[in-house]
Amino acid sequence: MSKAIVIGYLAKVSAANVNASHTEGNVVVAKKVTLPDGSTIPYISGQAIRRMLRDRLEELGYPLSEPFATVSGQEVTPPVRPWEFIDEDLFGYLDPSGGRRRTSPVRVSAAVGLFPFQGDRDLGTRSFERFGQAMAAGGNMFETELYANLFKGTVLIELDRVGVFKPLETGEENERTLPADERRRRLQTLLEALNILWGGGRTARMLADLSPKFIAYARLRVKHPVFLEALVAYYEDGKYALELAPLVNALQKFADYREQTLFGIEPGIFGNEEEIRAVLQEYGEVLTVHEALAKAKEDVGRLWGAS
């Protein structure tokens, strides 16, 4: 029986600061993590990725729970109706007033840059002349750290928990389980949300497309983020290239647990695209990303007894 779906993906950012940290003076700082050698790499937090997925789910027709939450001071009480709201089902909730809590069945990693931060900054200005004052009044200047990078991320979905709600999660006496067709539809919509992923901060002037340029999809008989440390890349001759040895090792390590495996790669992104296709086709079908996600939706459509 399948226990999990795991998706490893790579997203390309050409020039942006998708998920900023704090501000230092007049500089908007990018979120970064420090490596053992002292260099830093940018990352987009898992919380930000979850926010973007929520927003895409709403665009795709699912109402979210947030407008129905009760806010008192700094305390937010969710409606706790996961059978009604897809975000409560997939991303969980915490009810501070009654102790009802649902841990997210959809586990999301931070999207971590594969190349060091180079220290680039974007300079912005605001002239007071535009607000009816004399040019001599000047204006103000600000800077925003930005990067060009390839980000790796992983999504792990606990299949046995999607659409299944325990009494401790809802406060009800009995467990609730959604019909299988609704459970499948929610997962298929989540896959589509990943397919059209975008968002983050400063999109008015630093719009970024975070839809995957490469994905590895696996349906597993165990729960494990198999691709989390398996996506490695290098830069050569003006293009990114995927290092295949770590990914092949992960595929072989979990060969006995993989029940379905698919790959998607966008044309023109990777310098070793032909090599990627040739090597990975031994482990699963290699398609474009949108074709692979369409196949993944078909695979989800066969879960829980569907023909």
Image (cartoon, rainbow, N blue to C red):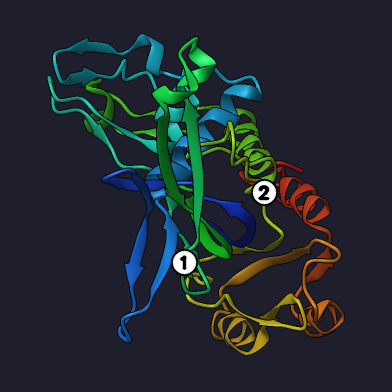
Residue type of the residue flagged with mark 2: Ser
Q: Eyeballing the image, is 206 above or below 89?
A: below
Can residue 158 be seen in this snapshot?
A: yes
Q: How many marks?
A: 2
Q: Eyeballing the image, is 79 above or below 55?
A: above
Can residue 255 be seen in this snapshot?
A: no
Q: Residues within 10 Å of mark 1 (few under 14, many from 20)?
A: many
Residue type of the residue flagged with mark 1: Pro
Circle 2 is placed at which residue position? Answer: 211
Q: Position of residue 63 (x, y in %)?
A: 53, 16
**Circle on res. 73:** none
In this view, the residue in front, 187 or 232, is: 232
Circle 1 is placed at which residue position? Answer: 225
Q: Position of residue 108 (x, y in %)?
A: 44, 52
Q: Position of residue 73 (x, y in %)?
A: 13, 14
Q: Quadrant of the C terminus?
A: top right
Spatial CA span between label 2 and label 1: 20 Å
Which secondary structure lies at badge 2?
Answer: loop
